[in-house]
Image (spheres, helix red, strand yellow):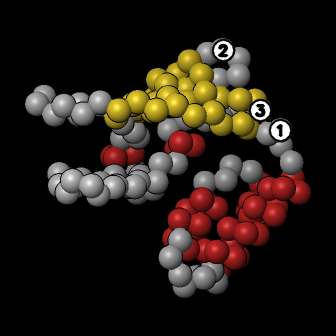
Amino acid sequence: MSFDINAPDGTVSHVSAPDPAGGPDITVRIGDFKLPPGETYHQLVRLSQWYQFTRPGTYRITGHLGPQRPGVNISVDNSFSLEIAPPDPDRLRAKCEHLLAKASEAAAGSWDAAIDLSLIRDPIAVPYLVYCVIND
């Protein structure tokens, strides 16, 4: 899987999945699996682990799922836009509060919320992370 990311300044970056040897925060499905006809498969991709969205504006992202090795004939491309808003401390605090509340639940999605909270690269998130760790 790879992505072409067209940034608001016109630059284009080609990014691929992070190296699984890059650390414990990288989750990668290892091995082959079979998907029966008519079934679907979903996988969460946190693009911020692949690419740093450093400026506000509209990013055009094209995902490529293609042959991963010889003999595998899969080719799927899809595009979408992502709008990065200018920094808004109040909105970020509200998002951190929401993620902390979800991470504190003993329900589906709590692990993903904790990971998402840990990936926020802003000092505003620190008190929420500390609370999450202390109360774990």
Q: How many marks?
A: 3
Q: Amino acid at mark 1?
A: Pro
Q: Is residue 111 left or right of residue 36?
A: right
Q: Is residue 27 or residue 131 the one in the foreground?
A: 27
Residue drawn at 71 percent across, 29 percent down: 58
Position of residue 90 measured from the top left corner of the image (x, y, whole percent) = 89, 57
Look at the numbered discs 3 and 1 and tell me whether their residues touch, using CB distance below 8 Å: yes
Of the numbered discs 2 and 3, the one sitting upstream in the chain is 2
The residue beneath circle 1 is: 86
Q: Tag 3's secondary structure?
A: loop
Q: Tag 2's secondary structure?
A: loop
The residue beneath circle 2 is: 10
Q: Is residue 47 or residue 52 the one in the foreground?
A: 47
Residue drawn at 65 percent across, 23 percent down: 7
Q: Is residue 38 left or right of residue 82?
A: left
Q: Amino acid at mark 3?
A: Pro
The residue beneath circle 3 is: 56
- In which image quadrant can residue 2 be found? top left
Q: Residues within 10 Å of mark 1 (few under 14, many from 20)?
A: few
Position of residue 3 measured from the top left corner of the image (x, y, whole percent) = 46, 30
- In which image quadrant can residue 5 be found? top right
Name above or below for residue 18 compared with residue 101: above
Q: Is residue 125 left or right of residue 88?
A: left
